[in-house]
């Protein structure tokens, strides 16, 4: 699908990958780009940089009523929505000790937001002959994320949601892609609830950066290319496809390899889960 002359909504559009996709959609000739972010000021900044064919909205993607209102307002003001980019997300570091509330919040942002978006926009897309859903997950959704239980679980569910949507609504003109990057140079670490000091942190030394750190503009172009080709997976780090194939072929061998990787990462410190051990 081409984005030329189409209305595009991008959540998490106030920075990073979402900001880059908003600009890329404009460059592709989108008739209007709605930049959505929890931080309305950042959404306004991105929309202003794009120009008169963009507007901004401050929306919490875990609020279904807010997503419905966003879709309805966009259709009323700009016409049928051609593509909905459900990109908002965040990262935390925690295991079994994580609180139920924290896990639920990540579930709402990483999973329910995709469902809310599809529920709100798919019926009108079908009525208008089709449309595109581009959902951001993570390489963690195909593999796992060492040190983060909730991130691993919710990103895996995000991939599954995309698969279900693609299977169920393809015959009605709905196309779906799921973005599964490893490390991208964004402020996701800075924006993490774990980051109480507000610093960017040692991003390039993170678990996901072993295969390099990709720039947001590169990721955005890969997303545009995938939508044009109507490919399901968008993999900015090609090695992820190999890792996923190995995982599917021999799960036990893959798990053993991941355990070795985890041990190497924590050679000078505690392993995840050590805090759960009884103090004898």
Image: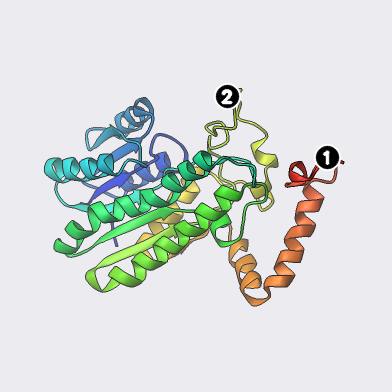
Disc 2 + disc 1, Cβ < 8 Å? no
Instruction: Report which quarter residue 123 is drawn in.
Output: bottom left
- Split into 4 quadrants, where in the image is the N terminus? bottom left
Residue 46, given in percent of the width and then of the height, sits at 35, 32
Place of residue 189 in the rendered image (x, y in percent of width and height, measured from the top left): 58, 35
Q: Is residue 222 left or right of residue 150?
A: left
Q: Which residue is at the far top?
A: 197
Could you say which is closer to the camera, residue 87 or residue 192?
A: 192
At x 56% / y 45%, what residue is drawn?
184
Q: Residues within 10 Å of mark 2 (few under 14, many from 20)?
A: few
Residue designated by label 2: 198
Q: Secondary structure at mark 1?
A: loop
Identify the element where label 2 is drawn: loop
48 sits to left or right of 18: left
Is residue 230 something one can see in this rendering? Answer: no
Q: Residue 52: in sight, yes or no?
A: yes
Horizontally, residue 264 falls left or right of residue 41, namely: right
Q: Nearer the viewer, residue 246 or 22?
A: 246
Task: Place residue 266 in its image quadrant.
Answer: top right
In this view, 210 is above or below 189: below
Report the number of discs. Answer: 2
- Front residue of 190/271: it is 271
Which residue lies most toward the right here?
Answer: 280
The residue where tag 1 is placed is: 279
- The answer to whether 224 is drawn above or below residue 201 in the figure is below
Residue found at x 37% / y 55%: 134
């Amino acid at each position: 699908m081409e984005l030329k002359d189409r209305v595009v909504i991008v959540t998490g559009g106030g920075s990073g990958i979402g900001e880059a996709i908003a600009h890329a959609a404009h460059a592709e000739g989108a008739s209007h780009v709605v930049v959505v972010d929890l931080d309305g000021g950042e959404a306004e900044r991105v929309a202003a940089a794009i120009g008169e064919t963009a507007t901004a909205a401050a929306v919490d993607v875990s609020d279904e009523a807010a997503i419905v209102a966003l879709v309805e307002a966009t259709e009323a003001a700009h016409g049928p929505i051609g593509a909905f980019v459900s990109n908002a997300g965040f990262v935390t570091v925690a295991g079994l000790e994580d609180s139920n509330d924290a896990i639920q919040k990540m579930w709402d942002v990483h999973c329910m937001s995709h469902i809310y978006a599809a529920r709100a926009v798919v019926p009108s897309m079908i009525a208008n002959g089709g449309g595109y859903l581009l959902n951001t997950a993570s390489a963690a959704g195909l593999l796992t994320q060492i040190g983060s239980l909730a991130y691993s679980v919710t990103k895996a569910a995000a991939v599954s949601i995309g698969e279900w949507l693609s299977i169920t609504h393809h015959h009605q003109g709905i196309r779906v892609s799921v973005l599964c990057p490893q490390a991208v140079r964004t402020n996701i670490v800075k924006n993490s609830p774990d980051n109480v000091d507000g610093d960017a942190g040692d991003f390039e030394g993170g678990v996901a950066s072993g295969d390099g750190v990709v720039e947001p503009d590169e990721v955005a172009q890969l997303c545009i290319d995938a939508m044009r080709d109507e490919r399901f997976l968008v993999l900015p780090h090609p090695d992820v496809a190999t890792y996923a194939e190995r995982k599917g072929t021999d799960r036990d061998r893959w798990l053993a390899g991941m355990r070795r990787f985890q041990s190497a990462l924590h050679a000078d410190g505690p392993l995840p889960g050590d805090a759960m051990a009884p103090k004898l």
